[in-house]
Image: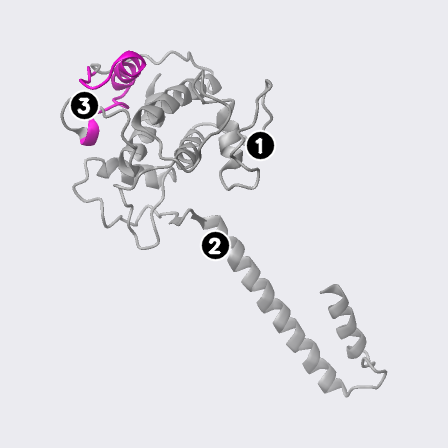
Amino acid sequence: MINEMTGTFQRLIGLSENGQDFPLLIKFSIFTKKMRRSKAMLAKKLAVVAATATVWMGLTSVGSAQKFTDIKDNPYESEIEEAAKILVVSGFPDKTFRPEEVVTREQAISMIVDGLQTLTAININEKPTSRVRPFLDVESSRWSAAKINWAQWNIMPEGTATGNFRPTDYITRAELLAFLRRSAEVLKAKLGRETVLKGNKQEIKFTDVSGYNEQLTRQMSAYCGIASPLNEKGEKFAPNEPAKRDYTAAAILRTINCVRNDYR
């Protein structure tokens, strides 16, 4: 573009490309046309950048005045709307939220990190404080790579394998809960608070969990009800079922609010 502009100015002051003079009016016309063409190209590039910044996996940010058209009577309706207002979750261009869609592991991590950033500053490009083997299936160019890498040495539960992350696999409800427990502990530490998650509700004894999942769900049900029955009905948590967008939004919001209100 610099060479093009230089040639244009040379013609403007009296020299054409073949050394012949141009009438001043013609020179000015050529110059203005080229400037308009360059301006149009720049506008297109900026539009592409803006679209890329606001669209994530087919999602667009939602203004506080906009309502989703497909969450009426959903048990998580109010929590979805609140999570959208603080930009933890987003809707689709057709104004739907698609609450029944399953959440992938990378989408869950992305939303969790966004949630943490509503209470504290997080540098997703910071270097790990200890030696960490990068996931083999998360390329550095992947849209979620920075958040996944940060999560790997900050909020991954102890014992998580460091071979493959499986970013496009769905996240189970138990996996989501484990990520959120660790996220709450990390968030409290960053805020200079005691990291113990003290229960403030009656714990729920789900009928379909045992061992580690039983301990996890009991603790997280007592901590602001982050662990709750499937579709908020009955006595089953469904730990191995895929986490859907509605519960994921609600669980992340509950985690954020519980940490925020811990010491109020």
Q: Mark 3 or 1, which is nearer the eye?
A: 3
Q: Mark 3 or 2, which is nearer the eye?
A: 3
Q: What amino acid is found at the position of numbered circle 3 in the picture?
A: Lys
Q: How many marks?
A: 3
Q: Which mark is residue 51?
A: 2
At horizontal 41% and vertical 13% (from top left) the residue drawn is 195
Q: 226 or 107: which is nearer to us?
A: 107
Q: Which mark is residue 125?
A: 1
Query: As drawn, is 158 to the left or to the right of 101?
Result: right
Q: What amino acid is found at the position of numbered circle 2 in the picture?
A: Ala
- Magenta stretch? 204-231
Q: Earlier in the sequence, mark 3 or mark 2?
A: 2
At horizontal 22% and vertical 48% (from top left) the residue drawn is 70
Q: Earlier in the sequence, mark 3 or mark 1?
A: 1
Helix, strand or loop at mark 2? helix
Whole-number angstrom distance, CA of label 3 to CA of label 2: 41 Å
Q: Which residue is mark 3?
A: 236
